[in-house]
Amino acid sequence: MIGASGFFLFDLVMTVVAPITTLAVLGSGSSQPSIESADVNELRQQCRRLQAQLQAQEEQAIAQSRLDTFEALQSLLIGYPSAAKMVGSQPEFPARHLMAMLTPLDHLLNQWGYERIGQPWDSVSFDPHLHQPDEEDISLGDSVYVRFVGYRQGDRILCPAKVSRTLPSNVQ
């Protein structure tokens, strides 16, 4: 993830590197006046500084993205270990009590512009662009059930929904 300032630095680096390369090619073996060595070295140093700055900004952007994601999921990350311990010690603990913990995931997916493909156990017409069948002989338009949702961002399919001709045996 590179912000606008990262692209600015990239453009700046390219603005410095392109003339150096052009002048070096023109200066080698032609009658054009050669660039003084000090100027070339200064431009190379400036190029290295700008590349290092660009690398540092990219690393900072990645770190910020991770921090933003952690903050969005913080309540889930804090509660999950305790919930797992509770379920481990009390196997009959109702799962519905855990569902509120997952709300931050829905908020994060909405914030990123990710949409679900299907709803669990819905009956839908098979579309090979949106669905991944559990059997090879499922054809376009066949009636299938969504076993696991998929996700999309606009027209881009991030992962297709997993579908089957039948529902799990314990589902009514």
Image: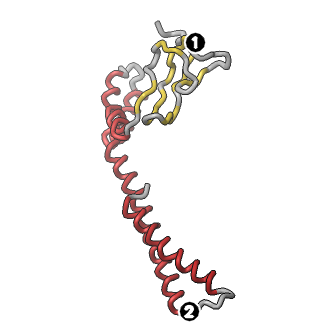
Q: Amino acid at mark 1?
A: Asp
Mark 1 to mark 2 CA distance (whole Å): 72 Å
From this view, report whether residue 88 is shown above or below residue 1: above
Split into 4 quadrants, where in the image is the N terminus? bottom left
Residue 113, image x, y percentages: 37, 37
Contact between marks 1 and 2 (CB within 8 A): the answer is no
Residue 74, image x, y percentages: 32, 43
- Residue pictured at 37% horizontal, 64% vertical: 5
Q: Amino acid at mark 2?
A: Ser
From this view, report whether residue 13 is shown above or below residue 20: above
Instruction: Identify the residue position indicated by label 1 in the image.
Output: 142
Residue at the extreme front: 31
Sequence-first disc among 1 and 2: 2
- Residue pictured at 48% horizontal, 12% vertical: 123
Horizontal side of residue 85 vs 39, given as left or right: left
User: Which dot marks residue 37?
Assistant: 2
From this view, report whether residue 30 is shown above or below residue 108: below
Categorize mark 2 by other alpha carbons within 10 Å: few (<14), some (14-19), many (20+): few
